Image: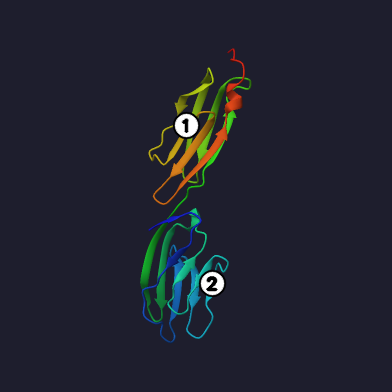
Amino acid sequence: RLVASGSDLLLEAKTAEVGPGEQFMWRFNTTSNLVKFRLGSEPLIKYKERTVFSKQNYSLLLKNMQHSDSGNYKAVVSGLEEKTVTEYTIRVQVSPVTLTVTPTNPGCYNFTVTCRTVDSQINGTFQCDNKTWCLLHQTHLKDSSLKVYVKESSVICNHSNQVSWKQDVKDVSSLCQKEKCKI
């Protein structure tokens, strides 16, 4: 299941009531118990500021999902034996994108851009000729979710995936106003 970074996610437990002496748990990546609950007692919740557990239907609301929240979530009933009642594999798609622009040679009209997300990075080197930018070199990615290009006087970095789209833009007009560089 794909989830956008920053969004909330409701995980529903598909289970019958928890019986006396049994414990209900939500686990993350098989080792971290997010919630432990026994009938007649208050649930133990690991991340109270980011999770809401329902004692009525055992659902778990995860708030502000982040890349590190990607993984396996299991609803487990434990008594004499442990039984998995619901399981989700969650992939949080991260779209925040950061663009940096670095002059290649101070005083010249070349610059390098780096466009990065949590998962990937792309670089490009641009040159100005008569106030028009052209791409000299660019790294290539297997996945084409990251694009960097110049439009008019701005360099633009786009990142898209199945659930979101983000963009970072920097003005580079001042870099093309300089005198031609003598190398």
Can you identify the residue that label 2 sits on? 45
Give the amino acid at mark 2. Ile
Q: Residue at x 37, y 70 (%)?
A: 86
Q: Residue at x 41, y 85 (%)?
A: 19
- Between residue 19 and residue 147, name the one nearer to us: 147
Cα–Cα span, label 2 and label 1: 46 Å
Name the spot of residue 42 as percent of width and height, x first.
54, 80
Total numbered labels: 2
Vertical arrangement, residue 125 with respect to residue 83, above or below: above
Q: Quadrant of residue 112?
A: top right
Q: Which mark is residue 119?
A: none
Q: Residue at x 48, y 68 (%)?
A: 61
Q: Secondary structure at mark 1?
A: strand
Disc 2 versus disc 1: nearer the observer: 1
Q: Residue at x 61, y 26 (%)?
A: 174
Name the spot of residue 10 as percent of width and height, x first.
44, 66
Vertical arrangement, residue 168 with respect to residue 139, above or below: below
* CA neighbours of label 2 inside 10 A, class few (<14), some (14 to 19), many (20+): some
Name the spot of residue 97 as percent of width and height, x first.
51, 43
Q: Quadrant of residue 81?
A: bottom left
Q: Secondary structure at mark 2?
A: strand
For marks 2 and 1 on the same chain, the one whose residue lies earlier in the sequence:
2
Q: Which mark is residue 149?
A: 1
* Quadrant of the drawing holding the C terminus: top right
* Quadrant of the drawing holding the N terminus: bottom left
Give the amino acid at mark 1. Tyr
